[in-house]
Amino acid sequence: MTGDEGRVVLVVGGGGREHALTMSLTSSQSVSAVHVAPGNAGTAAIATNHPISASNIDGMLELALELAVDFVVVGPEAPLVAGLADRLRENGIACFGPDSENAMLEGSKIVAKQAMADLEVPTADYFVLQAGESLEEDIEEALDVFSGEPWVIKRDVLAGGKGVVVTENRNEATNFIKSSIETDGEVLVEAFLAGEEVSMLVIMDEHSAICLPPSQDHKRVGDGDSGPNTGGMGAYCPAPVVTPEINSRIMQRIVMPMHEGLSSQEIPYRGVLFIGLMIDAEGNPFVVEFNVRFGDPECQVTLPLIASDFGDMLYCAATGTLVEHEDEFNDLCSLTVVLASEGYPSTPIKGRMITGEGITSSGNSWISHAGTKLVDGELISNGGRVLSCTAIGGSLQEAAERAYSLIESLKLEGSHYRKDIGYRAL
Ligand code: AMP
Ligand code: GLY
């Protein structure tokens, strides 16, 4: 800590995840001031927003220097891949979030696959397809090898959650392969993994790693996991699918080798590694994806379960002193339900007023703002995922009741939300 005064932190981003980060940071003893750029209506109410876009690397560096912050917490992946952490560190500013090279674990599926192969971390088998004379034959061969299950095709670029197609339709698979090669040069065809998905968030620096409680997202827009994929319609934590036995497999087979590999590099990994996992019917974990940031909405449900000083945890990871942080968790359960705009995920309608008594929520349930803004004192929708209602409880059932009672009290014309968040565990 910097004397009695506490540390000053800048949070980069403006979604539900960043509102959750800001809430936890403002309630950290070790933190005296929280700045957010660009932030949203939720962060404006509890911290200081600055109108700098998360993609403006120079602007963000300038702001961090001007505010003389003790550290920066980067919410989204794009600025990390673009080198924000590198620039901050070059200028003597501690950053929670990896450098651009490590960020390629999320920026490129092929880089992630190579890292897993080197470290013998279990993941799905795959082919890389590229343009060339034999492309037609290569496509047929890859689709034949993985036939009998849905085909999984992945673009090798940051696609904001829209880079993956899972389909049983061979034509659709072929078309997506071809269009991806046209725009990106190459594409992955991956074996389908059956099972239950779970998200592990691992806070790490080169000496230490802290696994946060596992959570589960709900990616499809509709109840019973129907309809198109979204950025995430709700989540809960902890996810009971991760039994102590499965947890120890995840640690042995995935977290420990990844941490060892990332720690032995010239520039070590300092930030959070989000491990998207598939747990098969025998309880074996496989990596589906890596992200180099907190999940959204996983962040909203995971942070309320951390009992130790969150600001200190992130500062220690950013400065390579995570061993000094004594982590502590509570025994609560949490659940969040996303309120989405009419038309989300394809064509969300923005600019509508949000009202309802739940707006001033507090205590055991609260609103995590995502796509919101204040216009003349009115709360207006400003994105596809508008906000999420998060609640804690002694049981998942209790958390679910509180979160649903909050979301039912809100009004936004045409909006929709899933009615079955947490159904696998309830
Ligand atoms: P990704 O961007 O890699 O996380 O993929 C998005 C979503 O596609 C994942 O959350 C899974 O639901 C699904 N998915 C990705 N890869 C696979 C796979 N190999 N088998 C089954 N589902 C997958
Ligand atoms: N909720 C999934 C993600 O943040 O990528």
Image: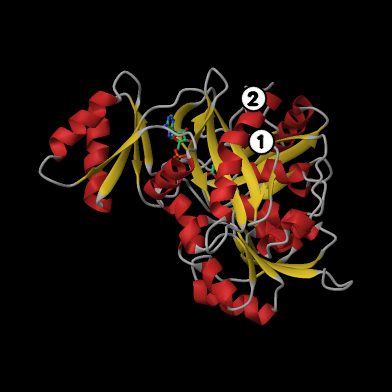
- Which circle's residue, 1 or 2, is located before the other in the chain? 1
Residue 123 appears left or right of 232: left
Who is closer to the viewer here, 49 or 192?
Answer: 192
Q: Quadrant of residue 356?
A: top right
Q: Answer yes or no: is residue 416 visible.
A: no
- Total number of numbered discs in the rendering: 2
Residue 227 appears left or right of 297: left
Residue at the extreme right of the image, as rendered: 4
Q: Quadrant of residue 256?
A: top right
- Three-letter amino acid code at disc 2? Val
Pointer 1 residue: 214
Q: Between marks 1 and 2, how big is the CA–CA gap?
A: 9 Å
Quarter of the figure that contains the C terminus: top right
Q: Where does the image place residue 159, in percent across and percent down from the top left?
A: 40, 50
Residue 172 appears left or right of 244: left
Which element type, helix, strand or loop, lies under badge 2? loop
Label 1 beta carbon within 8 A of ligand 2: no
Residues marked 1 and 2 touching at CB (< 8 Å)? yes
- Three-letter amino acid code at disc 1? Pro
Which element type, helix, strand or loop, lies under badge 1? loop
Which numbered circle lies on residue 241?
Answer: 2
Which numbered circle lies on residue 408?
Answer: none
Who is closer to the viewer here, 189 or 178?
Answer: 189
Q: Where does the image place residue 133, in percent across and percent down from the top left?
A: 10, 43
Quarter of the figure that contains the N terminus: bottom right
